[in-house]
Image (cartoon, rainbow, N blue to C red):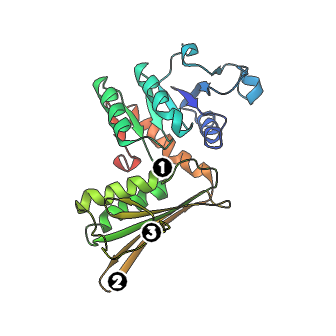
């Protein structure tokens, strides 16, 4: 039985994670964490009475194998660092970590030979889209990314979009050339990652969509995925939980294990 703590348990993604754990016969929900809650009574959240509720790191004194994190960008680094320090394998779905923070967390986990994963997206379609985009990057010199998320998403660009840009750049290993005559006083050309433009849209009615548009002389290619239900992410989370139990390093990206 894999014992699991869910951080950010009462958020939209956290609730899906709790349901996934409770519906899996190989998993056991032993604790939940959120520093902004007041009540520590599991009954107030519809949880089994055996589940421990925490709002402070100092309270967490239970044995756990996995720390699933769907909290907020400003908290995820400290949450993950805490889990690693306690020997709890992190499965991190919260975006907002910088490259320096990710590198530090990987170093801490690898030094302890602790398995874990930080994934910009646990959706299988999104991960496959990233892999397809990286393959296409070998044959196209130019690419732009458009990502659309719900209006409450706090960070931009999304972790998925940024990771997609990284994967493309890993293949191309060059910055796309800028047009010296280009004028864009309103910033409508989007963000820039090594010359790869990223456009972030935040609107109600969406959950998570992304498309990568490649262009070359006389042809173009669009790779696109859409998420219509957050429950779809749990397939990837479940896969990751089982996978990191057999690893002794922190993996960056679900595409590394699919």
Residue 145 % position (x, y): 43, 65
Mark 1 residue element: loop
Circle 1 Cα neighbour tier, 10 Å, few/some/many (<14 / 14–19 / ≥20): many
Residue 119, placed above or below residue 171: above
Which quarter of the figure has residue 46?
A: top right
Q: Earlier in the sequence, mark 2 or mark 1?
A: 1
Does label 1 or label 3 sit earlier along the sequence? Answer: 1
Disc 3 element: loop
Circle on res. 229: none
Q: Is residue 27 above or below residue 56?
A: below
Which label lies toward us, 2 or 3? 3
Q: Residue at x 36, y 46 (%)?
A: 257
Question: What residue appears at the point 45 percent right and 47 percent down from the top-left corner?
Answer: 120
Q: Marks 1/3: CA distance?
A: 25 Å
45 horizontally vs 31: left or right: right
How far apart marks 2 and 3 lie (CA) works out to: 21 Å
Q: Is residue 47 left or right of residue 69?
A: right
The reply to whether the C-beta atoms of the residues labelled 2 and 3 are less than 8 Å apart is no
Mark 3, residue position = 189
Q: Is residue 247 in sight in this rendering?
A: no
Mark 2 residue crowding within 10 angstroms, few (<14) / some (14–19) / many (20+)? few
Cα–Cα span, label 2 and label 1: 29 Å
In this rendered view, identify the residue nearer to me: 104 or 89: 104
Q: Residue at x 30, y 64 (%)?
A: 135
Q: Is residue 191 visible?
A: yes
The residue beneath circle 2 is 219
């Amino acid at each position: 039985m894999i014992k699991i703590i869910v951080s950010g348990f009462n958020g939209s993604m956290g609730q899906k994670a709790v349901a996934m754990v409770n519906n899996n016969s190989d998993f056991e929900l032993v604790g939940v964490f959120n520093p902004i809650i007041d009540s520590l009574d599991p009954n107030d959240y519809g949880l089994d009475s055996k589940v421990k509720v925490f709002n402070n790191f100092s309270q967490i004194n239970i044995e756990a194998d996995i720390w699933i994190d769907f909290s907020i960008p400003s908290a995820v680094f400290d949450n993950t660092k805490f889990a690693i320090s306690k020997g709890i394998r992190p499965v991190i779905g919260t975006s907002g970590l910088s490259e320096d923070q990710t590198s530090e967390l990987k170093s801490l986990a690898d030094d302890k030979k602790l398995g874990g994963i930080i994934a910009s997206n646990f959706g299988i379609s999104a991960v496959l889209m990233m892999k397809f985009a990286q393959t296409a990057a070998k044959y196209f010199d130019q690419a732009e990314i458009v990502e659309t998320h719900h209006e409450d998403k706090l960070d931009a660009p999304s972790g998925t979009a940024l990771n997609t840009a990284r994967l493309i750049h890993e293949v191309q290993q060059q910055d796309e050339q800028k047009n010296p005559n280009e004028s864009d006083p309103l910033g409508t050309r989007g963000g820039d990652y090594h010359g790869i433009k990223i456009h972030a849209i935040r609107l109600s009615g969406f959950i998570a969509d992304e498309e990568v548009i490649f262009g070359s002389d006389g042809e173009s290619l669009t790779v696109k995925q859409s998420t219509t239900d957050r429950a779809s992410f749990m397939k990837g989370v479940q896969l990751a939980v089982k996978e990191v139990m057999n690893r002794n390093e922190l993996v960056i990206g679900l595409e590394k294990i699919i």
